[in-house]
Image (spheres, grey):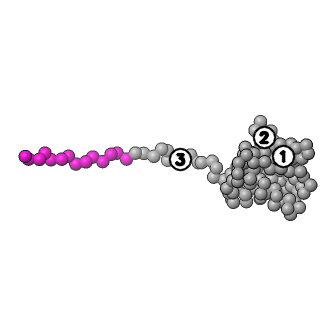
């Protein structure tokens, strides 16, 4: 579990490392272009926080693990979200939730019977 530290003294937001890696890429890209935006983070307790990100924001991204594989589709969705007037909202990763099987559990085929052996005439 990683953390996004915002401000001084910092407000700390806990995010899993994979999510934090994607958020970091979007935030740094926006700030590199001097684009300000709001970031809304849903909290585990059911609330939410919205913070204003701009070039003078004090930020620190703290990871518990080394690098995460980047999902380009998810990154694009987060970028699109950050470019709206409402600001960036952390969306669920596409494909992270598996859809339930529509046909139910796989059916076993009945075992094939081997032909009966003829008694040998000895």
Residue 77, position in %: x, y? 73, 57
The extreme bottom residue here reads 33
Q: Is residue 113 left or right of residue 49?
A: left
What whole-number distance in Å separates the C-alpha atoms at marks 3 and 2?
Answer: 31 Å
**What residue did someone put label 2 on?**
43
Determine whether the residue tagged by mark 3 lies in a helix, strand or loop: loop
Q: Secondary structure at mark 1?
A: strand
Question: Residue at position x 92%, y 55% from top?
Answer: 56
Q: Which residues are magenta?
A: 109-122
- Is disc 2 placed on a helix, strand or loop? loop
Q: Mark 2 and mark 3 in contact (Cβ < 8 Å)? A: no
Q: Residues within 10 Å of mark 2 (few under 14, many from 20)?
A: few
The CA span between labels 3 and 1 is 40 Å
The answer to whether residue 84 is above or below residue 8 is below
Residue in the foreground of this view, choosing between 66 and 23: 66
Assess disc 1: are there few (<14), some (14-19) or many (≥20) residues with their C-alpha within 10 Å of its C-alpha: some
Between circles 1 and 2, the one closer to the viewer is 1
Q: Pinpoint residue 45: horizontal percent, then vertical percent.
A: 77, 36
* Towards the viewer: 81 or 56: 56
- Mark 3 and mark 2 lie on one chain; the one further toward the N terminus is 2
Mark 1, residue position: 5
Question: In the rendered image, which residue does mark 3 sit on?
Answer: 101
């Amino acid at each position: 579990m990683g953390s996004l530290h915002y401000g001084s003294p910092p407000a700390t937001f806990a995010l899993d490392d994979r999510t934090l890696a994607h958020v970091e890429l979007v935030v740094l890209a926006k700030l590199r272009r001097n684009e300000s935006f709001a970031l809304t983070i849903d909290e585990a307790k059911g609330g939410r926080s919205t913070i204003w990100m701009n070039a003078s924001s004090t930020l620190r991204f703290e990871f518990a693990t080394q690098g995460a594989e980047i999902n380009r589709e998810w990154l694009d969705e987060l970028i699109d979200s950050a470019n709206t007037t409402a600001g960036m909202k952390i969306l669920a990763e596409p494909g992270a939730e598996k859809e339930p099987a529509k046909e139910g559990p796989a059916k076993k085929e009945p075992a094939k019977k081997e032909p009966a052996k003829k008694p040998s005439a000895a």
